Image (spheres, grey):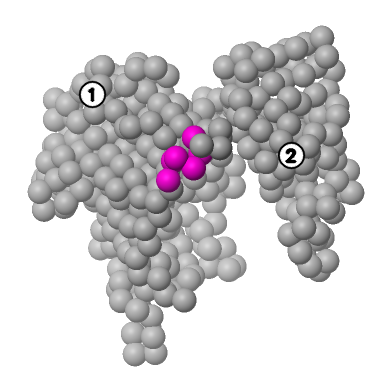
Amino acid sequence: MNVNTLAILIPLTLYSASGISAPGYKQGATLPTTFQNTIYAVDHGVIVDDGIDDSAALQAIIDNEVTASTSKNTVIILPQGTINLSDEIHIDKSGLVIKGAGSDPATGTQIVVKSWSPYGVDASNAPDFDKKYWPGFGVFRVETREKHVKEPAYEGSVNFHWKHSIEFAQPAKMGDNTIVIESGKAGEFSQGDLIYVGAANDKAFLDKGQVPESRRSGSHIKTGHMRTQIFKVTAVNSGNNSVTLDGALEFDIPLNNESGYNSRVMPVSAVENFGLQDFFLTMDTKGSHCEGYNRNQFSASNPNGVLYRYENVCAQDAIHGIILKWAYNGWVDNVRIDMIGSHPIVSEFAKAVTISNSTIDGSWKGGWRKWLCSWL
């Protein structure tokens, strides 16, 4: 089915009436309109309408001028006009807001990304890259750049899988808000910490999902957590190895599955209290592997069209628009993303994020067209 426009509205009264926390930024709170600190990008080398890459200048503002805060916001004001980017911008500090002059490209802030072709191409014509940098590259990446000593080559590796080693001492049930983990590990958490909870893919879960037997032998099924949640820790009891969560589990937690893979928890280092708003974002295909394609519907008479073509057509340039990874309590508001390299907005382990008043119109990877975003 071809869906041109979709509007999703979630009535928050349903949540408050049932006693469940509303979704989105600070449980559905109104997005802030005033900020404690303001930085004007034009004062730090970001020059519009000159056709010159502004990536280094914008990243330098984030790296050198912004102090991280989970309670206060620093806003970087982007000027009206066209800003050129040719590298990934890391929003790796809590309390950082990137705000343009509006999402109309004619009158607001137009951000044009020039692909730096960061990928190879695998046998299936998909982007081929080091999967430790999953889900790939984006124009804006909201994720910590903190490294772990065991993976010093990778920014963000503080949240990598080998840290994911704390197992459950007891199974847990859907609806529980207290979990019991292996002896001595509760002390690794403190009140206010973020905690990842992952349930092993056991037979009961696969049966409920009607997963065919022929599909259950894959390593990603046997050793994966397809059911995950992120919580805030509200209490820790080292005496009985329990951790109390700020919400209820949405699924059962087995100790392990039939392949011996364990359910686990881990501490999370997230970027919090962030925002991206009021700008237009697109990709310039000139000189890229996407240059020979057009945004029209794929058909025998138009073999280079990408509308409703669900495949990678220029994998070397499949750069996402906005990546939210290990991100908590933030928003994307009044952003228009038009024909970006790959997925317009990607969320990987993101919680309490409001996406509102935004329009997504396609990607050069091929796919949908015109989705009006208004959800929490």
Mark seen at residue 25: none
Query: Residue 54 versus residue 297: which sits nearer the camera?
Result: 297
Residue at (76% x, 64% y) in the render? 210
Residue 174 appears in view: yes
* Left or right, 105 with reference to 2: left
Q: Which residue is mark 1?
A: 34
Expressed as whole percent of the image width and height from the top left, the position of residue 187 reads 73, 12
Q: Is residue 14 magenta?
A: yes
Magenta segment, which residues? 11-16
Which amino acid, by three-letter code, is at mark 1? Thr
Q: Main secondary structure of the magenta part?
A: helix
- Residue farthest to the bottom, as pictured: 301
Q: Is residue 327 magenta?
A: no
Query: Residue 52 versus residue 67: which sits nearer the camera?
Result: 67
Sequence-first tag of 2 and 1: 1
Query: Residue 166 versus residue 290: which sits nearer the camera?
Result: 166
Which amino acid, by three-letter code, is at mark 2? Met
Q: Which quadrant of the view contains residue 81? A: top left
Is label 2 in a helix, a strand or a loop? loop
* Left or right, 121 with reference to 292: right
Residue at (74% x, 39% y) in the render? 174
Please say if 27 is above or below 214: above
Q: Which quadrant of the view contains residue 12? A: top left
* Left or right, 201 with reference to 313: right
Real-space CA distance between mark 2 and mark 1, rounded to the nearest whole angstrom: 39 Å
Expressed as whole percent of the image width and height from the top left, the position of residue 3 reads 40, 71
Q: Quadrant of the C terminus?
A: top left
Mark seen at residue 174: 2
* Left or right, 24 with reference to 229: left
